[in-house]
């Protein structure tokens, strides 16, 4: 197709050429979630410079119309109607351009986009869910899985693992997403679990024995982001953590963050601030809120910081950030 048509510039143009009996709506949805169609938004100037979390839902919303357009185009072509009206030359290219406009759609949150990538590709492609927590995890002293594998654990300065076979470090913590889980029972019938914890650098096996499982078992599900604290058992070939504590990773933010800062770029209006006020009321807490406002000025933009009334306090969480970014745009929230 690329040899025949050159670069395909829009979803509508793609649907004109593909056999839609083989590439159906479900295929298009999976490719959109994976990011394979990001370049097909280029024909619409309204999406120029927008992040993929804004582009992909608009492509998703255009699939039905694009498939109908492609099917109609192919049907007319096979029936010879094109020749009746002068062939498939310049006028048809004009149709492609007018059809290329993508319908509006609510942007995906960062978690939604990464979840769709994992669903379709089996891996996170544009980032990792824990990337947003990297600074807070580091401040708490948590290690990455890559650091765990490189860590030299000396027997003389550590405890020894089960059976005295592997050196251990008494206190280790790491944040990540639970990937796979095996629910087990001991000989006494007590419940325990073994799971793989993944971050952007790799994965590590975590053993959760009955005492810890009794306190934290409800968190041990695939797809949940957690902070694991425990003893690192390591040899030259492998590493695993014997968990003593498991907590939701967003509690890291609650421990560290003192302020929720919101970047305001471009025109602001009363409705926007009223919507934010409603969001704040749903997430009451004890952390202050501030605005970093960027005003157009010459030769460089003017940046102004504005603190909100001390009567408004929020609890930092993933849901709070997601709701604010639905209004203000992806990446507009930072925790300080």
Image (cartoon, rainbow, N blue to C red):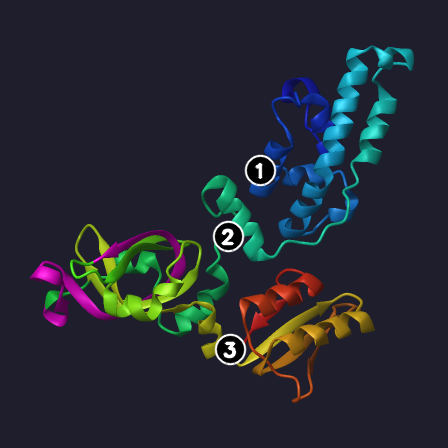
Question: Helix, strand or loop at disc 2?
Answer: loop
Disc 3 or 2, which lies upstream in sequence?
A: 2
Question: Helix, strand or loop at disc 3?
Answer: loop
Q: Quadrant of the N terminus?
A: top right
Q: Residues within 10 Å of mark 1 (few under 14, many from 20)?
A: some
The alpha-carbon separation of the residues under discs 3 and 2 comes to 22 Å
- Contact (CB < 8 A) between labels 1 and 2? no
The residue shown at (69%, 87%) is 309
Relative side of 222 to 158, left or right: right
User: Would residue 331 be counted in the magenta stretch?
Assistant: no
Q: Quadrant of residue 64?
A: top right
User: Would residue 183 be counted in the magenta stretch?
Assistant: yes
> Residue 222: x, y in percent?
41, 54
The alpha-carbon separation of the residues under discs 1 and 2 comes to 18 Å
Question: Helix, strand or loop at disc 1?
Answer: helix
Looking at the rendered structure, which numbered label has been put on residue 127? 2
The residue shown at (47%, 66%) is 133
Give the magenta part as a residue range. 156-185
- Contact (CB < 8 A) between labels 3 and 1? no
Looking at the rendered structure, which numbered label has been put on residue 257? 3
The residue shown at (34%, 64%) is 217
Relative side of 274 to 157, left or right: right
Disc 1 or 2, which lies upstream in sequence?
A: 1
Magenta stretch secondary structure, dominant: strand
Q: Quadrant of the C terminus?
A: bottom right
Relative side of 186 to 38, left or right: left
The alpha-carbon separation of the residues under discs 3 and 1 comes to 37 Å
Q: Quadrant of residue 136?
A: bottom left
Callout in the foreground (3, 1): 1
Looking at the image, residue 210 lies above or below residue 59? below
Callout in the foreground (1, 2): 1
Residue occupied by mark 1: 30
């Amino acid at each position: 197709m690329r040899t025949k048509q050159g670069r395909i510039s829009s979803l509508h143009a793609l649907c004109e050429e593909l056999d839609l009996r083989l590439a159906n709506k479900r295929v298009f949805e999976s490719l959109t979630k994976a990011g394979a169609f990001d370049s097909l938004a280029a024909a619409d100037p309204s999406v120029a410079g927008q992040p993929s979390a804004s582009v992909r839902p608009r492509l998703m919303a255009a699939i039905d119309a694009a498939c109908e357009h492609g099917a109609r185009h192919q049907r007319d072509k096979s029936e010879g109607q094109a020749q009746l009206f002068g062939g498939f030359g310049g006028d048809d290219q004009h149709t492609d351009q007018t059809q290329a406009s993508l319908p509006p759609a609510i942007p995906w949150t960062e978690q939604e986009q990464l979840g769709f990538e994992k669903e379709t590709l089996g891996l996170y492609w544009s980032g990792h869910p824990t990337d947003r927590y990297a600074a807070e995890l580091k401040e708490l002293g948590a290690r990455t899985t890559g650091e765990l594998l490189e860590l030299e654990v000396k027997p003389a300065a550590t405890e020894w693992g089960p059976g005295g076979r592997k050196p251990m470090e008494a206190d280790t913590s790491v944040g990540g997403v639970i990937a796979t889980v095996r629910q087990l029972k001991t000989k006494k019938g007590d419940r325990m679990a073994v799971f793989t914890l993944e971050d952007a650098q790799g994965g590590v096996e975590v053993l959760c024995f009955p005492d810890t499982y009794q306190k934290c078992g409800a968190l041990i599900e695939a797809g949940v982001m957690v902070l694991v604290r425990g003893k690192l058992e390591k040899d030259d070939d492998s590493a695993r953590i014997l968990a003593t504590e498991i907590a939701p990773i967003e509690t890291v933010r609650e421990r560290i963050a003192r302020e929720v800062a919101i970047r305001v770029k471009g025109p602001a209006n009363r409705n926007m601030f009223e919507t934010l006020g409603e969001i704040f009321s749903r997430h009451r807490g004890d952390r202050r809120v501030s605005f970093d406002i960027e005003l157009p000025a010459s030769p460089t933009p003017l940046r102004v910081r504005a603190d909100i009334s001390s009567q408004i306090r929020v609890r930092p969480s993933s849901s709070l950030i997601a709701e604010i970014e639905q209004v203000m745009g992806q990446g507009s929230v930072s925790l300080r």
